[in-house]
Image (cartoon, helix red, strand yellow):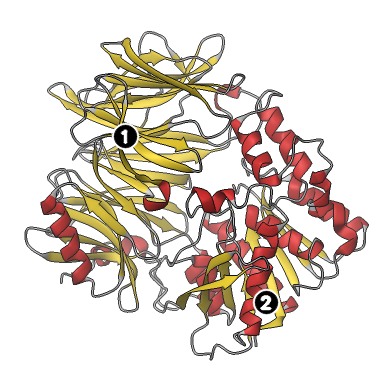
């Protein structure tokens, strides 16, 4: 076992890994290693590290652990890190500032930057497209890489601006610094699929007004096959290509489940069924390609199936070598001789590692949270909701305390169509370190398969809400927690659950804390309608499916909107919201705070400047955690 690569970077990261860091700072700061990427040749690793004065990109040689290049990248909101080739590292960041002085509803835009490790030069892409083409300088989706005699080429999705803005496909030669428009889309265009040779082989369209979707198979720019249908929300989605490159892999909804199926590029017919969605969570793709190398189900125990038997054998060895720790696959290099992975265990902590499959050697990269040397126990539990529905959940227990009559934080996830699992959750771990048990329920509507999600349709604020509080009652009946010492905390949809806990379920919780929570469902839907130009969209239809509403004027929304039931609040409420939130409008919290103050209810409202929906900035993320813990200690002391 070699020394950690992170040791090589100690001089750069001293401000991050100070030995006497306060406990809350250890969790609340951005991760010491926020992202990692393995180079195609397997000889280098790129890391994004958080510093007090911003993020730093470092590139290290794996063999001799020498620092090859470094660049300060300021304080952008990081979204992705990957290699284009062995010379260029690609960094995707996010901003809510409107490009080109445009106006409209606040949304998040992604920007793509290339760092040349030979010239130590950073270049923002899509700023110099040839032939006078105007672009919005933003991207969406993942780039496809083609290596040609003329240089390394990227195919990226962006936006083309003429008299209006439309989706477009661009070709960027990183080596030569050339950028050009390849395809201009229309209002219905969702995107294109590009093969390893740089040929555009498929296009996805969706017409919102008619709910009609279309997948067109292309050959030399012309449509040769076409598949169409109608879906209000769950239109088919191209996930990638088969290993042979002769078919698309498409997620298709069939009756009560989504299935991953192949769509032939030869005749446009659906073929083999890979698996239903409850059996898969990720299609694993070759680096820089759309071709699949395997599939994954990343649940409590991650399961991976690789098409290459040697890669499968190598992965199985990595799992055995980690001696029962939870191991997640991150990426492989081009010839599949090395694997970048994440590991979570009592000895290793939460960390990155590199496996050399030919040498059977594991090289630790470093802990993702350098100062967290003790991980609280996470237990998987099940309980029955009031109507008998089985709810899987996770209980994080504070170290050094017997699991009896503990103070508890009920911490539902966002989404709502998301899920919790056994993993390192910095919120839950930070609260457990303060002495609280933390309950994370996968209420109906969570993404545990289509049938489980469908059980939540129409149950927003109803059974989706009572599923959460039923978990509290279960733990109290088991004697593990003290129901009189329970608070509910959540973000996004979880923030709604917290506010609904204080309004729709009075007497259940001792306090409630909401980060970016929804308080007024009708106002939320109206905002979505404005963003869609006043028309129903996939987004509004998605929300209405869970809310059980016919539109923004449906009186049912008032029944489950916390802002309409402030008179029922009898406990302290904490509201926190980022001013730059593009997902849940800032007004959802500010209006709730104003209404509570007018009614004389106990409320604290904290506004986070320059922060988004995801707590992407280290300073405001730590501010949020400190504010939350101070509030909980006052309202529900853990001692």
| Nearest to viewer (mark 2 / mark 1) | 2
Judge by depth and name the residue closer to the eye, 24 or 104: 104
Determine if residue 481 is in view.
no
Q: Which mark is residue 473?
A: 2
Whole-Å distance between the Cαs marked 2 and 1? 44 Å
The x and y percentages for residue 323 are 23, 75
Label 2 SS: helix
Work out whether mark 2 precedes mark 1 in sequence or the reverse, and give the earlier one: 1
The x and y percentages for residue 420 are 50, 61
Which residue, as the protein is rendered here, is positioned at the far left? 359
Q: Is residue 410 left or right of residue 26?
A: right
Is residue 128 positioned above or below 519 on the image?
above
Which residue sits at x=18%, y=25%?
Answer: 151
Label 1 SS: strand
Judge by depth and name the residue closer to the eye, 338 or 204: 204
Q: Which mark is residue 604?
A: none
Q: Quadrant of the N terminus?
A: bottom left
Q: Is residue 467 left or right of residue 4?
A: right
Q: Residues within 10 Å of mark 2 (few under 14, many from 20)?
A: some
Judge by depth and name the residue closer to the eye, 237 or 264: 264
Q: Residues within 10 Å of mark 1 (few under 14, many from 20)?
A: many
Q: Which residue is mark 1?
A: 240
């Amino acid at each position: 076992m070699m020394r950690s690569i992170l040791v090589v970077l100690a001089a750069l990261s001293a401000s991050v890994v100070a030995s006497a860091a306060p406990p809350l700072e250890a969790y609340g700061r951005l991760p010491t290693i926020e992202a990692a990427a393995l180079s195609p040749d397997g000889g280098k690793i790129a890391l994004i590290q958080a510093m007090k004065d911003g993020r730093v990109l470092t590139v290290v040689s794996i063999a001799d652990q020498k620092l090859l290049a470094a660049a300060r990248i300021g304080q952008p909101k990081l979204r992705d890190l990957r290699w284009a080739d062995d010379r260029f590292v690609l960094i995707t960041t996010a901003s809510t500032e409107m490009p080109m002085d445009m106006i409209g509803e606040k949304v998040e835009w992604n920007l793509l930057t290339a760092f040349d490790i030979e010239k130590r030069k950073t270049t923002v892409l899509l700023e110099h497209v040839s032939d006078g083409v105007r672009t919005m300088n933003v991207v969406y989706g993942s780039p496809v890489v083609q290596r040609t005699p003329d240089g390394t080429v990227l195919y990226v999705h962006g936006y083309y601006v003429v008299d209006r803005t439309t989706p477009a496909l661009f070709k960027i030669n990183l080596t030569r610094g050339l950028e050009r428009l390849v395809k201009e889309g229309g209002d219905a265009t969702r995107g294109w699929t590009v093969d390893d040779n740089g040929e555009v082989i498929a296009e996805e369209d969706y017409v919102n007004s008619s709910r009609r979707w279309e997948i067109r198979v292309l050959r030399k720019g012309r449509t040769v096959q076409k598949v169409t249908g109608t879906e209000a929300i769950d239109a088919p989605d191209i996930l990638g290509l088969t290993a042979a490159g002769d078919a698309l892999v498409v997620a298709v909804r069939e009756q009560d489940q989504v299935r991953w199926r192949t769509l032939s590029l030869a005749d446009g017919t659906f073929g083999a069924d890979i698996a239903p969605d409850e059996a898969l969570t990720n299609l694993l793709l070759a680096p820089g390609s759309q071709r699949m190398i395997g599939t994954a189900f990343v649940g409590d125990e991650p399961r991976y199936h690789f098409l290459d038997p040697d890669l499968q054998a190598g992965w199985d060895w990595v799992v055995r070598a980690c001696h029962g720790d939870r191991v997640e696959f991150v990426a492989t290099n081009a010839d599949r001789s090395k694997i970048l992975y994440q590991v979570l265990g009592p000895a290793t902590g939460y960390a990155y590692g590199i496996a050399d499959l030919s040498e059977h050697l594991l090289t630790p990269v470093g802990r993702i949270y350098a100062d967290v040397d003790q991980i609280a126990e996470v237990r998987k539990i099940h309980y029955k909701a009031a109507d008998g529905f089985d709810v899987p959940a996770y209980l994080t227990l504070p170290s050094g305390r017997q699991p009896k009559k503990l103070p508890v934080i009920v911490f539902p996830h966002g989404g709502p169509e998301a899920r919790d699992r056994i993993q390192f959750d910095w919120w839950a771990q930070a609260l457990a370190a303060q002495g609280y048990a933390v309950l994370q329920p996968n209420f109906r509507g969570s993404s545990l398969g289509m049938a489980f999600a469908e059980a939540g349709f129409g149950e927003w604020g109803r059974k989706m809400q009572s599923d959460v509080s039923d978990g509290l009652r279960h733990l109290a009946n088991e004697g593990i927690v003290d129901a009189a010492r329970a608070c509910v905390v959540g973000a996004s949809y979880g923030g709604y659950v917290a506010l609904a806990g204080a309004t729709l379920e009075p007497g259940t919780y001792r306090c409630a804390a909401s980060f970016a929570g929804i308080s007024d469902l009708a106002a939320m839907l109206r905002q979505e309608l404005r963003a869609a130009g006043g028309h129903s969209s996939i987004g509004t239809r998605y929300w209405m499916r869970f809310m059980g509403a016919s539109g923004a004027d449906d009186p049912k929304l008032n029944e489950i909107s916390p802002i309409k039931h402030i008179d029922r609040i009898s406990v302290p409420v904490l509201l926190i919201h980022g001013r730059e939130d593009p997902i849940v409008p800032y007004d959802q919290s500010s209006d709730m705070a104003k209404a509570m103050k007018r009614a004389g209810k106990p409320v604290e409202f904290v506004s986070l400047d320059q922060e988004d929906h995801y707590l992407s900035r280290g300073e405001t993320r730590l501010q949020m955690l400190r504010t939350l813990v101070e509030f909980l200690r006052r309202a529900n002391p853990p001692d």
